[in-house]
Image: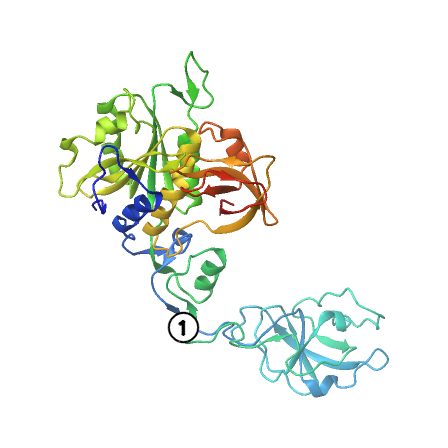
Amino acid sequence: MSSAATRPAAPDDLWSVDEHLEDILSAVRPLEPIELQLLDAQGCVLVEDVMVPVSLPPFDNSSMDGYAVRVADIAGAGEEFPAVLEVVGDVAAGAADPVRVGPGQAARIMTGAPLPPGAETVVPVEWTDGGLGEGPVSGMRSRSLAPQGAEGHVHVYRSAAARAHVRARGSDVKAGDLALEAGTVLGPPQLALLAAIGRGTVRVRPRPRVVVLSTGSELVQPGEELGPGQIHDSNSFALTAAARDAGAIAYRVGAVADDAETLRSTIEDQLIRADLLVTTGGVSVGAYDVVKEALSYAGDADEAGSGVEFRRLAMQPGKPQGFGSIGPDHIPLLALPGNPVSSYVSFELFVRPAIRTLSGLTDVHRPRARAALTADEALRSPRGRRQFLRGVHADGKVTPVGGAGSHLVAALARANALIVVPEDVESVEPGTEVEVVLLG
């Protein structure tokens, strides 16, 4: 894989959000299909049309516990004059050779059991005396069937139409029908259907494996005590969770100190289990921006088309970004800024679409909507930058939460949308209709 940039980024050149995203999506390709067991295929995208080999249900069966009977034998049955039928046997679920029901006869039948030969309908046990010789009870009965194998007669107190309480063969799907079409994301109901029609494996695009690592000597694992100048590492947790939310199998790597050789070695060690690498931090212009130092020098381009390019985007937050590929298999790498909000916004705009493209999905972006801005004062935005502000969206309105600072994690936790302010807009008055990216 190689970056498909439309033009090189000059030192003072700014890429637009759309240019950077187009560059990423033009270079990332869906993963090759593989055959997986059903539960391993959960969340994956189907790459083949699946046809129904056998009808569901495969035979007429009862939807109730009760008695399988002939319609004529219970015609006119009522509380005062019940139909009295001879019980000739039992039909349990899974029965291979059910008894035959003749005139004046009934067979005890369980839910899911095949309708026996000769029977035309099923009367629920609540409409009978349960085969126990009990008298009629007005209203709905609470009955149970007589023990299996018990001989005798059953009193039926209501008539039933033909095929009542019978699930017809093929009433769900018929042999030859299309069960699932290519492009379907396999969730629990889809896996249930595949299992029901007898499929043990299915051909899908696998869920992408995404490795997330953060950089910074100041970062401390949550749960550990902070020293002077230290902060807890939140970015790697946020991005790993976001990758899983996007459908990936995500691996979080502990924070790497500000050392280019250590970072490069760590990244190379992770290539064996990565379809996509995501780093956060170290992509700006500071003295300790180790991601740029580790990946942008000429020695990284050891394979044709390999290498990571760092660029500045006309957006806020998230101006510094990096994208390219590394290693002999050209694993795509997206380098995100280190400020928490910048990192998360960058993920939603660039990494999530890349993950969903690797998955083989066609709808790779978060949904967007129009909403009326509710705020106490106008929103300010720097000209020439596309700004993404956190907001709470509900009932066609959106309210900003927090300020424009890229470190405000608490506001991000309350937001369910991003308010988009275009590059040519410097002020947005309350009541103005704005575009929002829906995060929920």
Disc 1 designates what residue? Answer: 53
In depth, the one of 121 and 352 nearer the eye is 352
The percent coordinates of residue 319 (x first, y second) are 35, 34
* Left or right of residue 368, residue 182 in this image: left
- Vertical arrangement, residue 217 with respect to residue 19, above or below: above
* Left or right of residue 437, residue 24 in this image: left
The percent coordinates of residue 221 (x first, y second) are 42, 23
Q: Amino acid at mark 1?
A: Pro
The percent coordinates of residue 299 (x first, y second) are 14, 31
| Point 42% across, 57% down: residue | 185
- Vertical arrangement, residue 84 with respect to residue 40, above or below: below
In depth, the one of 60 and 370 nearer the eye is 370
Scheme by which the image is coloured: rainbow
In depth, the one of 56 and 148 nearer the eye is 56
Q: Secondary structure at mark 1?
A: loop
* Left or right of residue 249, residue 146 in this image: right
Number of numbered markers: 1
Is residue 389 in view?
A: yes
